[in-house]
C-alpha cells in the first residue's frame, strides 16, 4: 500500500507492479560498461497518475533541450541499476530517494549509441521540492499519463536499432515534444497498465 494513497492509486500501482520485473536485484556482479538507468517517477494528483519529466539543459553535448526522465550511467558505487536511477534523480532534481517507492523495472532499452537503459518505475510520495540542477537540466514538469496514450500521439517515428526497426509515438504536451527513448518508455508503461 502506498503511504497516504487512495484505493484507486493502490489498485493501479498493484497492477503495474505485477507487470514489472523486480526493481532491485541482488548484486552478483557490476553491470557491464555502457549501462544506464532512468527513474520513471509517477506522482498521483487528484487520483490521476502523472509522470515527472525533465528538459535537458541547452548547453549539454548530448541531447540538449530534449525531454527525458531523470537518470544516467551506472557508477561503480551503485549497488544496482535501481540505485543508479535514484542517485541520478537526486543529483538532477533533488528528489530524495526516500520519497520514492520503487514498483519495479522494465526490460532495458538499447539506444542507437549502444547504451543499455533500464527504466525503474517508482511512485513519488507527497510533493517533494524539485529543483533542476542547472549543470544538467533547465526544467522539471509533470504530465498526466492520460495525455500520453497511443491515441494522444501527434505522430509516430521509426528508428532502427540493433534489435530491429521500432515505431515510437511522438507526444506534444505543454509546448514540449516528447519523443525517442522517453516516448518509447512511456508507450511501454502504457502497455503495462492496460
Image (cartoon, grey):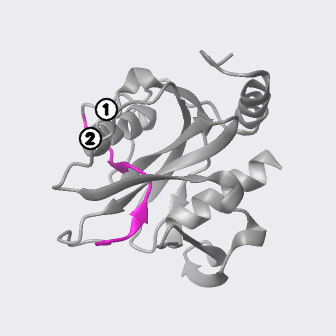
Residue 50 visible within the image: yes
Q: Nearer the viewer, residue 70 or 26?
A: 70
Looking at this view, is 80 or 158 the one in front? 158
Span of residues in magenta: 63-76
Q: Quadrant of the N terminus?
A: top right
Q: Position of residue 2 (x, y in %)?
A: 64, 19
Q: Which mark is residue 75?
A: 2
State the residue in front, 36 or 137: 137
* Residue for badge 1: 78
Query: What element does badge 1 sit on?
Result: loop
Residue 66 occupies quadrant? bottom left
**Does the segment drawn in magenta span residue 68?**
yes
| Residue 84, picture quadrant | top left
Residue at the spot x=32%, y=71% of the render?
Answer: 65
Q: Is residue 143 left or right of residue 80?
A: right
Whether 141 is drawn above or below 165: the answer is: above
Amino acid at each position: 500500500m502506498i503511504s497516504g494513497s487512495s484505493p484507486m492509486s493502490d489498485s493501479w500501482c498493484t497492477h503495474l507492479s505485477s507487470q514489472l520485473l523486480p526493481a532491485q536485484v541482488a548484486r552478483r556482479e557490476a553491470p557491464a560498461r555502457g549501462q544506464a538507468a532512468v527513474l520513471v517517477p509517477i506522482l498521483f494528483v487528484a487520483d490521476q497518475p502523472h509522470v515527472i519529466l525533465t528538459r535537458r539543459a541547452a548547453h549539454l553535448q548530448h541531447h540538449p533541450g530534449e525531454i527525458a526522465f531523470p537518470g544516467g550511467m551506472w557508477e561503480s558505487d551503485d549497488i544496482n541499476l535501481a540505485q543508479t536511477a535514484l542517485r541520478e534523480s537526486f543529483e538532477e532534481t533533488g528528489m530524495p530517494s526516500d520519497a520514492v517507492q520503487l514498483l519495479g523495472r522494465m526490460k532495458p532499452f538499447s539506444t542507437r549509441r549502444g547504451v543499455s537503459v533500464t527504466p525503474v518505475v517508482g511512485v513519488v510520495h507527497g510533493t517533494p521540492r524539485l529543483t533542476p540542477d542547472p549543470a544538467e537540466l533547465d526544467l522539471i514538469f509533470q504530465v498526466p499519463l492520460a495525455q500520453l496514450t497511443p491515441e494522444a500521439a501527434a505522430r509516430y517515428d521509426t528508428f532502427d536499432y540493433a534489435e530491429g526497426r521500432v515505431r515510437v509515438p511522438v507526444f506534444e504536451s505543454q509546448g514540449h515534444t516528447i519523443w525517442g527513448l522517453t516516448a518509447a518508455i512511456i508507450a511501454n508503461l502504457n502497455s503495462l497498465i492496460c
